[in-house]
Amino acid sequence: MFKGCYTALITPMEKNYDIDFENFKSLINFQVKEGVQGILAVGTTGECATLNWDEHFRVIEEIHEQVNDRCLTIAGTGSNHTQEAITATRHATDLGIDTVLLVDPYYNGPSSLEIRKEYIEPIAREFSEIQLIPYVIPSRTGTQLLPQDLAILHHEYSNMRAVKEATGNLENMKLTRKLCGADFEILSGDDNLTYQMMMSPEIKADGVISVVSNIVPRATQNMVQCILDGNLSKAFELSEALAPLFELVTINVKESTPYGSIDCKIRNPLPFKTLMNVLGMPSGPCRQPLGKLTRRGMKILLNNAREVYDTHPHILEPIEDFFDVDLSERLYKKNWSALHYD
């Protein structure tokens, strides 16, 4: 059911940090035109943590209305408060959306057993007509729905047939496949692991909920579809071509301070919002406390984007066509100092 590439869509902002709903439409239409299987509204990439619930609901409404059944809308309705998640899921179902993403409850850190019994199960029972996709990402949430509890959910509820897997732990993924069976769908939550997860006979992932597909939806969808179709040489070529972009989901650099050097981990969505600005796609700034890249981070971002443009220009060509921009000028001639810290 969920085989393919789904884009975890960036939420564009105006300079004053209001949501840029007008330009949102162009990003959605770009994704649909480029053939993704679906769009995820207000995931981590969509800055759900800094949207209030009114904004959260409106973003879901705008995406669902603009998609207009041309692909699947997945509504991000998870929370660290079960009643909030129920309210958000009800809002999505009232719109006619039939798939929601439920991130593990962050910060308050329930056990896997509690996540199953006090979070997923109440929603699965109340909304039996819609599909639930748990989103397992312990690096962000500090907790984890384990494969054993995921398997119980899958075997007890017909609307529990998939997971967004972002543990980065291949052994965890293998156990999920073993316990949940062949009829369960594993979607990669890490772009850089998608090829490996799909190719592994012990994982057999079915697709990806992707960050990179914000800028290269067709290439990402094609890579996934080639694996599903058995065109493995083409899939490998696409994976290698996209690798410099996969590396940008998180940028790690060392920065100097008067008190010694520090590790600086620049995390999604900041690198890709910055790259979209560079490429001429509407995105705007991130909401605080996310800020800007460092100078070193910006250098990595530009070098990786230039590598893809120079070696595989067809991958970025749809951006030029759809948004009417000159990528050579934007990647090599413009000064982007305003997008990074001094």
Image (tube, helix red, strand yellow):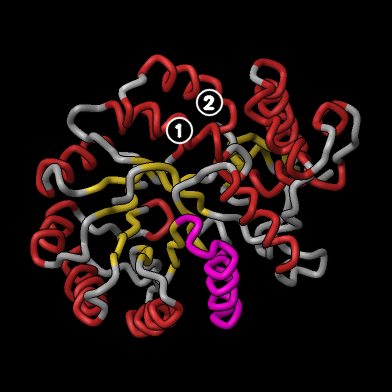
Kind of residue at disc 2: Ala
How far across and down, in percent of the image, does residue 264 sit? 61, 42
Q: Residue at x 35, y 19 (%)?
A: 232
Cα separation, mark 2 vs mark 1, equals 7 Å
Residue 267 position (above or below residue 318): below
Give residue 322's quadrant in the image. top right
**Neighbour class for label 2 at 10 Å: few (<14), some, many (≥20)?**
some
> 335 or 310, which is in the foreground?
310
Counting residues from the start of the chain, the first of labels 2 and 1 encountered is 1
Amino acid carrying mark 1 in the image: Asn
Quarter of the image holding residue 84? bottom left
x then y, percent, for residue 216: 60, 37
Tell me the quarter of the image containing the C terminus.
top right
Horizontal and vertical percent position of residue 318: 68, 35
Report which residue position mark 1 lands on. Answer: 192
Give the residue drawn at x 36%, y 65%.
99
The residue lying at 71 percent from left, 68 percent from top is: 21
Q: Residue 11 at what x, y percent from top left? A: 63, 61
Residue at mark 2: 243
Assign the magenta stretch its main secondary structure.
helix
Per the rendering, the mark at residue 99 is: none
**Disc 2 + disc 1, Cβ < 8 Å:** yes
Q: Nearer the viewer, residue 51 or 279?
A: 279
**Magenta region:** 47-71
